[in-house]
Image (tube, rainbow, N blue to C red):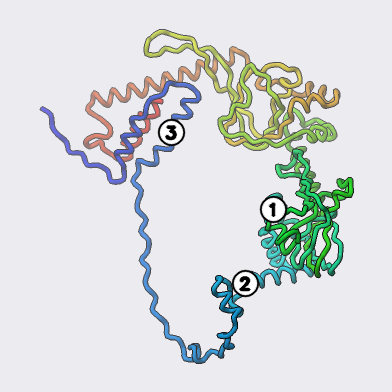
């Protein structure tokens, strides 16, 4: 005789999502499939909890305040009668401001130009911040400079006054016209940016240099026709040593009195030099702290630093597989890498036929301030293990072509101090580690199965009847789903 038990459902569980979570399709066990199945499960898991609706506080309508008699329209001073001023009606019809409306933008520009008249050393922190925010509105600067670099350069910009008919040569800086008009002298257009990669930064090392032609396609830079108006730019942030011919003189002639902002090219060159110096110092400290390079002379480490580049890898990225030759030497700056060794194991699928399959055995990991790949690159020997990133990893790397270009003394020193990655592990150590993990896994499966059968034969079914507890039920479903993977 069967007794029907009416089970009360929990209000905090979405049973539709829970049912979908418990019936996820089982995937054949492999390293990549387990990772993808785990990611799918972790994305689906939060959906089984019913989200509470957020109730916003009620807004009360404010009571109207009485306006004092002195603040009424009658007490205000009379405005001038502009009913016959056609300029005001034209501006209103075109959606512009009236003559007596607020001029916030114009006031900001006036304030900006007044600050630039001061020497940079006499400006307050708030004034430096105003200059930086105004420069961020100029596309030619923000498209080619990082925000932090622009903030540093903004602390040393100056404003120059040029009278009508003056020739402004932009070879020594980048210029922005704040007031007035100017006309370029050069009759051709050239893109003077140099195409080369930097080992210390991901932004271009040289700035756009503009030599304008008669046919202007960008109205922001040129205004109307070939004339350069307010916020137009010219010049270069390349130092004068890079200028080789007269065609690189980016000069303009002022057609009226002009106020021109100048960003000196030397300031940008000093900024790049200081950034390179700080990054090189960081690389020297990183390499010096690696175990194989503790006793290295600083001069030899500086030789390695000239060829290093920063590189980032996402979690789960296979850097090198066992049996392959790695293409670079790596120095881990942040994160860690997992080390696996290959072994031939036995598998007994549902067909009950024992098969030999290749498995990866976790043997350890490489942490921060550790290096790998020296022996494989210099001697061209395959890696004996597989290296996989455990989380986001940033490394300083030296490519194989750069490493072979080092002088023989440095290469010989690297061969004497470096060792193969996890080269101390023998095949017997790998087999022993594999057997221990297999025994632990089998014991865990046996223990879970025995406990589950014992509970079932004693009439105890977690999640049903008086053993229906929301926490136990969720935990049991999670455990069953994880075991299926």
Give the left or right position of residue 239, taking residue 436 as reference.
Answer: right
Question: Could you say where residue 2 lies in the image, as x and y percent from the top left?
Answer: 12, 29
Question: Do the residues under discs 3 and 2 have CB atoms within 8 angstroms?
Answer: no
* Secondary-structure class at tag 3: helix
Q: Give the mark nearer the N terminus: 3 vs 2.
A: 3
Instruction: State how far apart marks 3 and 2 are (Cα).
Output: 52 Å
Name the disc covering residue 40, or none.
3
Vertical side of 93 occupied by 279: above or below: above
Q: Residue tagged by mark 2? A: 104
Residue at 52 percent across and 17 percent down: it is 359
Residue at 27 percent across and 26 percent down: it is 455
Q: Where is residue 220, by image quadrant?
A: bottom right
Q: Give the mark nearer the N terminus: 1 vs 2.
A: 2
* Secondary-structure class at tag 2: helix
* Circle 3 or circle 2, nearest the eye: 2
Instruction: State how far apart marks 1 and 2 are (Cα).
Output: 30 Å
Question: Could you say where residue 369 lies in the image, as x and y percent from the top left?
Answer: 69, 34
* Circle 1 or circle 2, nearest the eye: 1
Label 2 CA crowd tier, 10 Å (few <14, some 14–19, many 20+): few
* Secondary-structure class at tag 1: loop
Question: Could you say where residue 417 lies in the image, as x and y percent from the top left?
Answer: 77, 24
Q: Residue tagged by mark 1? A: 217
């Amino acid at each position: 005789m069967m007794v029907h038990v009416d089970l009360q459902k929990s209000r905090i569980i979405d049973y539709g999502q829970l049912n979908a979570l418990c019936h996820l399709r089982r995937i054949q066990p492999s390293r990549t499939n387990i990772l993808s199945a785990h990611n799918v499960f972790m994305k689906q898991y939060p959906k089984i909890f019913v989200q509470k609706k957020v109730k916003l506080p009620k807004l009360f309508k404010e009571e109207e305040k009485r306006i004092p008699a002195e603040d009424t329209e009658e007490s205000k001073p009379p405005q001038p009668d502009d009913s016959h001023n056609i300029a005001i009606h034209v501006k209103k019809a075109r959606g512009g401001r009236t003559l007596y409306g607020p001029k916030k933008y114009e006031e900001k520009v006036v304030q900006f130009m007044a600050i630039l008249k001061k020497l940079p050393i006499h400006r307050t922190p708030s004034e430096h911040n105003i200059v930086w925010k105004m420069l961020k509105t100029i596309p030619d600067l923000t498209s080619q400079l990082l925000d932090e670099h622009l903030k540093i350069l903004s602390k040393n910009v100056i404003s120059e006054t040029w009278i009508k008919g003056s020739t402004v040569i932009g070879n020594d800086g980048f210029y922005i016209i704040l007031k007035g008009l100017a006309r370029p002298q050069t009759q051709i257009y050239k893109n003077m940016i140099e195409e080369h990669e930097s080992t210390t930064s991901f932004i271009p090392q040289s700035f756009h240099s503009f030599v304008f032609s008669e046919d202007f396609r960008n109205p922001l830079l040129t205004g109307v026709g070939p004339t350069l108006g307010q916020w137009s730019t010219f010049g270069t942030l390349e130092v004068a040593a890079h200028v080789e011919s007269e065609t690189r003189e980016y000069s303009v002639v002022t057609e009226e009195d002009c106020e021109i902002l100048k960003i000196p090219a030397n300031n940008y060159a000093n900024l790049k030099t200081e950034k390179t110096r700080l990054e090189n110092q960081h690389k020297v400290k990183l390499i010096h702290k690696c175990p194989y390079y503790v006793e290295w002379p600083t001069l030899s480490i500086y030789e390695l630093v000239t060829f290093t580049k920063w590189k980032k890898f996402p979690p789960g990225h296979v850097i090198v597989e066992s049996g392959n030759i790695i293409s670079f030497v790596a120095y881990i700056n942040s994160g860690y890498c997992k080390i696996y060794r290959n072994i031939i194991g036995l598998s007994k699928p549902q067909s009950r036929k024992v098969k030999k399959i290749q498995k990866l055995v976790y043997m350890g990991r490489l942490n921060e301030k550790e290096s790998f790949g020296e022996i494989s690159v210099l001697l061209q020997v395959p890696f004996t293990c597989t290296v996989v990133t455990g989380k986001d990893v940033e490394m300083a790397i030296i490519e194989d072509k750069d490493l072979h270009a080092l002088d023989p003394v440095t290469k010989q020193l690297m061969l004497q101090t470096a060792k193969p990655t996890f080269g101390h592990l023998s095949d017997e150590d790998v087999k022993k580690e594999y057997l221990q993990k297999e025994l632990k896994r089998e014991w865990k499966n046996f223990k879970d199965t025995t406990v589950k059968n014992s509970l079932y034969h004693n009439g105890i079914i977690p999640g049903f009847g008086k053993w229906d507890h929301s926490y136990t039920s969720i935990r049991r479903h999670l455990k069953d789903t994880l075991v299926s993977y």
